[in-house]
Image (cartoon, rainbow, N blue to C red):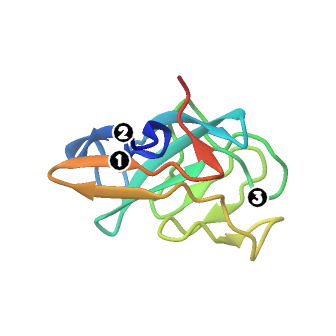
Amino acid sequence: MPDLNLAPQFLCVSADLREREGSVLFEVLEYGRTAPAFAVRANQQAVAYLNRCAHVPTELDWQPGEFWDHEQKFIICSVHGALYEPAHGQCLMGPCTGKRLVSVPLKEEGGQVFWLPSDRFQPVF
């Protein structure tokens, strides 16, 4: 019998992730502890990260689900102003330059987006 905890977890329909606009919020269990996460679309690619600054473990969004800077080029930390490249989560400017956001693996197929559980990330039931 397959391990249901490792089955891809439905996140949203693809249309819910608009290019550099808004986000989809969700939660995962990271090593058994609940952790907030978010998904966005940049360069036609759906990506997801833990909602945690690479500098200090604080949530990034400046309003619930709002992660984009005013030009909608970068993910921005509301506390430190750090700017992250959305495609790979690397901090390009700020106190965490060179560090990365923690990526949550996604799969997009058939007009749907799924996040992929692993040894690190499990579904919240």
Quarter occupied by the N terminus: top left
The residues tagged by marks 1 and 3 sit, at their Cα atoms, a distance apart of 24 Å
**Residue at the disc numbered 2:** 11
Q: What whole-number distance in Å separates the C-alpha atoms at marks 1 and 2?
A: 5 Å
1 and 2 marks in contact (CB < 8 Å): yes
Residue 109 x/y as whole percent: 21, 56
Q: Amino acid at mark 1?
A: Phe
Q: Residue at x 62, y 54 (%)?
A: 76
Mark 2 residue element = strand
**Residue 103 picture location, percent across and down:** 58, 59
- Residue 63 coordinates in the image, percent (x, y): 57, 31
Residue 93 percent across, percent down from the top left: 71, 71
Nearer the N terminus, badge 2 or badge 3? Answer: 2
Calculate the distance from the C-alpha at mark 2 to the C-alpha at mark 3. 24 Å
Which amino acid lies under the numbered mark 2 shown in the image of this protein? Leu
Residue situated furthest left in the rendering = 110
Residue 61 image-quadrant placement: top right
Residue at (64% x, 71% y) in the render: 90
Q: Which mark is residue 54?
A: 3
